[in-house]
Amino acid sequence: MARPIPNLHDISRLNEEIKPKDSKTVLDLVIDNVRSKSSKDLVFGTLTGWMTGIMVVKVGKVAAFGLGGSVLLLHIACEYGYICVNWERIRESAGSSHVWLEKLIKFVKKNSCFSVGMLGGFFFGVAST
C-alpha cells in the first residue's frame, strides 16, 4: 500500500508509521447509529413514554378518584347555588381547543420518531406494571 503524500509543513511526522484504521465493532456501529438525531429521539421518546406509562398506572387510580370526586362536588355545589358557572366563558375557551390540537398534530408530524417512541413506551409502561 502506498503512503499518502506527506504534509510539507510537518516533516517531523515522516518517521512515524502509518497504521490502517481499526475496523469498527458491532458496538461501535450501534453507538454511531444511536448518536444520530432520529435514533436519539426514538430512544428518548421510548424511555419517556415508559416512565409516563408507569406513573399513570401508579398515580392513575388516585388521580381518577380525586378528579371524579371533585367534578361531582363541583356539580353538586353548582346545583345548590354555592357557585355560579360562567358557561359562556367555558364555551369560548373550549372553542380555542382546535388550535391546541393543530399544534399537537404539527408537533407529532415534525417529531415522528419521538412520538412513535413515546406512544410505544407508554403502552409498554402501562403493560409492565
Image (cartoon, rainbow, N blue to C red):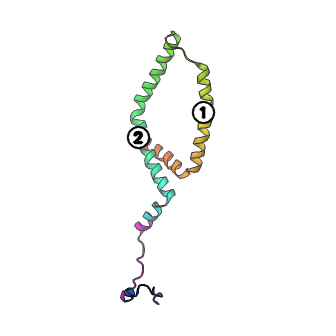
Residue 124, above or below 56: below
Residue holding disc 2? 54
State the separation of the CA atoms marked 1 and 2: 28 Å
35 left or right of 12? Answer: right
For the record, the magenta segment spans 15-30
- Residue 94: give x, y in percent of width and height: 60, 28
Residue drawn at x 45%, y 25% as measured from the top left: 67
Q: Secondary structure at mark 2?
A: helix
Q: Residues within 10 Å of mark 1 (few under 14, many from 20)?
A: few
Residue drawn at x 53%, y 52% as measured from the top left: 113
Image quarter of residue 69: top left
42 left or right of 87? Answer: left
Q: Is residue 21 magenta?
A: yes
- Residue 63: give x, y in percent of width and height: 42, 29
- Residue 41: give x, y in percent of width and height: 49, 53
Whether label 1 touches label 2, CB < 8 Å? no
- Residue 90: give x, y in percent of width and height: 58, 23
Which of the two labelled residues, at mark 1 and mark 2, occupies the earlier sequence position?
A: 2
Residue holding disc 1? 97
Residue type for callout 2? Ile
Of 105 and 121, nearer the camera is 105
Q: Is residue 124 visible?
A: no
Residue type for callout 1? Ser
Q: Secondary structure at mark 1?
A: helix
Residue drawn at x 48%, y 18% as measured from the top left: 72
Q: Residue furthest top?
A: 80
Q: Main secondary structure of the magenta part?
A: loop
Tell me the quadrant of the picture where the C terminus can be found: top left
